[in-house]
Amino acid sequence: MKKKKFTVIDESFTCTVCGNEVAPLGYTARNHCNRCLCSLHLDNNPGDRQNDCSGILRPVGIERNKKGVQIVHKCDKCNILKKNIAADDDDYDLIVKLSVNKS
């Protein structure tokens, strides 16, 4: 039997970076803070919680594609790049800053 590539985990959490109380999205999995856009490196595949790195995934840029706006994160601990689809309640001003700060 083939393993799922996406496990939906849409639950509230407290952001370890900014302390924001992040509510569930209600329409897909919540995978980053809507205030600072940071996440934790916990997954190999979305929602599987199989990665033991636990580094902070910080937003470093955005990409636009058929899925919409994706936030590009870089892990502070292992330097991996991950992409997460922007949520409806994400800080739009911060997303705009990411789009103009090409580094």
Image: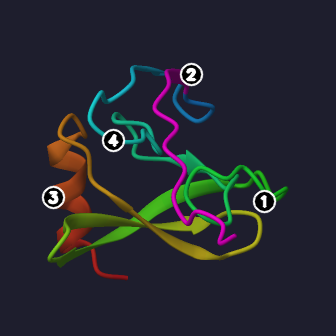
Q: Is residue 19 left or right of residue 48?
A: left
Residue occupying the far bottom of the picture: 103
Q: Is residue 50 left or right of residue 73?
A: right
Tell me, for residue 51, which label it has, or none. 1
Q: Which residue is disc 4 drawn over?
A: 28
Distance (Cα) linking label 2 and label 1: 19 Å
Q: Quick one: label 3, few (<14), some, or many (20+) residues within 10 Å?
A: few
Q: Which residue is disc 2 drawn over?
A: 14
Q: Residue at x 25, y 40 (%)?
A: 90
Magenta segment: does it hold 56? no
Distance (Cα) linking label 2 and label 4: 18 Å
Q: Quadrant of residue 91?
A: top left
SS type, badge 1: loop
Q: Residue at x 39, y 20 (%)?
A: 23
Q: Mark 2 or mark 4, which has the lower sequence index?
A: 2
Q: Mark 1 or mark 4, which has the lower sequence index?
A: 4
Q: From what the image shows, is residue 22 above or below residue 36?
A: above
SS type, badge 2: strand
Q: Mark 4 or mark 3, which has the lower sequence index?
A: 4
Magenta stretch, main secondary structure class: loop
> For this rendering, which residue is in front, 78 or 11?
11
Q: Which residue is disc 3 drawn over?
A: 96
Residue 70 position, x and y percent, is 29, 66
